[in-house]
Image: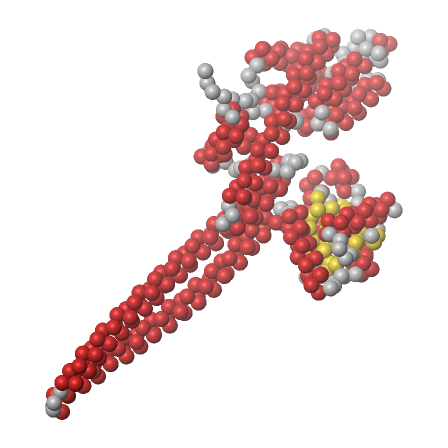
Amino acid sequence: MIEKKQPATIAREALKQLNVLKLAPTPANYQACYNEIANLPNVAGFPEAPLRQLSLALTARNPDQGTQLELLDTAIGQRSWQKVQDALVAFTGASKTGTPNGGNTAPVMSNECMTNLANAIENILPALGNDDERFSAQVAEFLQVLRDPSADAQGIEAMFADFSHRVSIAAEEQAEIKVALLKLLHLIIENIGELSLDDSWLKGQIDALLIAVMPPLTLRRLDDVERRIREVMFKQTEAKSRSMEAQEEMRMMLSAFIERLSMMNNSSNVFQDRIEKSARQIEQVKTIGDMAPLLKDVIDATRAMAEDARNAHDQLQTLQEKALTAESELIKLHLDLDQASALARHDPLTDVLNRKGLDEALAKEIANMLRKDAPLSISMLDIDNFKKLNDRLGHETGDEALVHLVKVAREFMRPADSMARYGGEEFVILMPDTTLDKGVQAMKRLQRELTRAFFLAGTEKILITFSAGVAQLTSGESGAEAIKRADHAMYMAKRAGKNRVLGA
């Protein structure tokens, strides 16, 4: 009997396999390795795009079917297999109560629609795996029926109900596996961070990975984080290699310094022995003629000692200059490491601070505020009608609009101000040495600047506006509490008509 592996053991082996295969540490790659080791089907995610295509291909032949199509679109948006199944089954059933031509038995769906449905099901199949041969045979039969123009509508309805039930089970299992894998990844990454206490330069990468595995996940987001982490890893590896070389040079210089000190000590001992020997010999001299060679020995010994001391001084001075140079290099390398780690504290799309970077910047500004007894204002801003912009022009254009907002804001902000992406289309701006009234005025000026700087989506000019709330940090208040007040003021600005700034 084969012993069943524990999840922790499978997780470790999956990480090793990622390294052996030189795969990027994304959740999808990790899940594939984990499923392979655990002998589990490698199911794919919710096929939203094919289902959207299916929904567009369906045509309502009566009001009931129109209602079910609306429910189908909602179910797809909620990524609920059960609701998708219910909407499709109800859509098929609605044809019996409202068929055209006085109740004639016209086909529920056109041949083109049935073909599109068959294609959509084929796109869904990878999510179900191929471990169930009986079900695979049923699906093959179902696809053959769908592509048959003379197929019976009721038969299609029954077969589709069975298929939908199977899909709902697979989707639930895949969702549970995804949650479990994310928990394992999060735990492993946290443990790596705890075990790497001496390697503080890893902190930036650990923080970025923890952000990457936080739901909801998108492939574009994972690709952006992977690109940023690879840049950080390259710079950190290069900087750490140079740091190790500089440390080795320092070690060799210290070794040479100690060796030179030892040689000076030996030379001093030899000189002392020669002087003592000459002193004893001088005590026994009876004539001036006998003293001449002894004086010559003393002078020669003194000259030799002086020459050794001069050489030692020159060598030690050279070592000191090299040590200062190496020390300067090490300081620069540590700054390079800090800068490389800081890359992981920025949002990959807009290059402003992310939530982790915001926490660090906010803590720093609060400390400065307390030390200087100066005001600190925090603004929360949210782009107006951003969802409509995404729905009408696509997510890529939405991303470009976010980048445009950040570009305009950076041109307007002071060097001391900090900007962070709080989430989605929400941004936070930290304004040190700024009272509440001045903070509100600053955000209104930014609104005017944004009004003048039109956003171009292709050849279309789009006016981007935002609603904002501003809060001044009070005595004893935490940064999170001030952000919460600013967020509430921003919400009230939205309710008041958008494109407004309110103080908290």
Occupied quadrant, residue 213: top right
Question: x and y percent of residue 414 in the render?
Answer: 71, 61
Which residue is outermost to the bottom? 288
Residue appearing at x 58%, y 52% in the figure: 342
Q: Is residue 498 left or right of residue 76?
A: right
At 54% from the left and 52% from the top, the residue drawn is 340
Question: For the point 55% across and 30% down, which residue is it?
Answer: 31
Q: Is 235 or 330 nearer to us in this picture?
A: 330
Q: What residue is rendered at 73% in x and 54% in y?
A: 429
The answer to whether residue 149 is left or right of residue 190 is right
Viewer-proximal residue, 413 or 487? 487
Q: Quadrant of residue 313?
A: bottom left
Expressed as whole percent of the image width and height from the top left, the position of residue 367 reads 68, 59
**Any part of residue 401 in sight:** no
Q: Quadrant of residue 322?
A: bottom left
Q: How many marks?
A: 0
- Which residue occupies the foreground of this view, 271 or 309? 271
Q: Quadrant of the N terminus?
A: top left
Left or right of residue 180: residue 75: right
Colouring convention used in this rendered image of the protein? secondary structure
**Residue 133 seen in this snapshot:** yes
Q: Horizontally, is 345 left or right of 11 in the view?
A: right
Q: Nearer the viewer, residue 492 or 389?
A: 492
Q: Is residue 492 above or below residue 57?
A: below
Decide: is 279 above or below 338.
Answer: below
Q: Position of residue 150 (x, y in %)?
A: 70, 8
